[in-house]
Every structure is written in structure tokens, then in C-alpha cells.
Amino acid sequence: QAHLVESGGGLVQPGGSLKITCTAFGIIDSIYEMAWYRQAPGKERELVALTTDTGSTKYTSSVEGRFTISQERTKNTVYLQMNDLKVEDTGVYYCYVDGYEPGGRFQTWGQGTQVTVSS
């Protein structure tokens, strides 16, 4: 069964940059959508950015112009480059993948990676 491994979180000062990575492992036939969500303390999980198999992207308004989602399809990997980070970007960032494996469709989440923006 497909599973996700995330990396790259950490502590950064306001205005700084961070890049997080998510790779899907397993026998994967195709991936329709890869996305990043985040959950701040005391808040619900929210969509940050997504990218589809056609290359289209979508961002939540608060990160437009600062974050860039990209994918490396041959490696089943998605990246989130985060620039000009703000304190309110702090949270656990979760990768989400929607695709197909030999057993059928799968929709799975990563374990989350902590991003803390603080001076």
C-alpha cells in the first residue's frame, strides 16, 4: 500500500525560507493530485497548496506569491518552497496524495512535519 514520507520541516525566523518534501512509496500506477495541508495549534487542518497530474496548481490566498508547490512525477515527489515565512505559517504540514495502485484508488496522508516560524 502506498505510503508517504515527509521531510524538511524545522525552525525558521520570520522572513526566512524553508522547503519541505514528500515522497510516495509503494507500487503506484499513477497520481492524480498531490497537496500540502497544514494544521496550526487549536485550528482545523487547511489546504495550503495542491498540484494535479496536468500541472495545474492552487493556493490558499494567504500563501499566494510566497509559496510554490512543485512536483517531480518520475520520483512521485512533491515539494513546497516557502518564502517570506510569517509567524502565522507555523503548524504541522501534512502531505496528501490521491492516486492509483494495483489494488485501486488510494488517498493517503503523510505523518506531518513541523514548521515553526519564530524569532
Image (cartoon, rainbow, N blue to C red):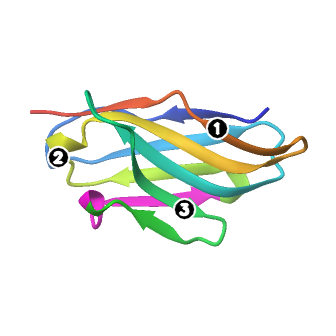
- Residue at 52% over, 51% down: 35
Q: Is residue 63 magenta?
A: yes
Residue flagged by tag 1: what amino acid is it? Thr
Dot 1 lies on which element? strand
At 79% from the left and 32% from the top, the residue drawn is 1
Location of residue 116 in the rendering, given as x and y in whole percent from the top left corner:
25, 32
Q: Please say if 1 is above or below 76.
A: above
Residue indicated by mark 1? 108
Residue stretch rendered in magenta on the structure: 62-72
Is residue 81 located in the magenta-colored stretch of the structure? no
Residue located 62% across and 57% down the image: 33
- Residue at position x 60%, y 64% from top? 52
Query: What residue is disc 2 on?
Result: 86
Q: Amino acid at mark 3?
A: Thr
Residue 74 spot, x, y in % from top left: 72, 56
Residue 40 vs residue 55, the one in the foreground = 40
Please identify the quarter of the rendering in which residue 11 is found.
Answer: top left
Q: Is residue 58 left or right of residue 30?
A: left
Looking at the image, is mark 1 or mark 2 nearer the viewer?
A: 1
| Mark toward the start of the polypeptide (1 vs 2) | 2
- Density class for disc 1 (Cα within 10 Å; few <14, some 14-19, many ≥20) is some
C-alpha span from label 1 to label 2 = 28 Å
Distance CA(mark 3)–CA(mark 1): 15 Å
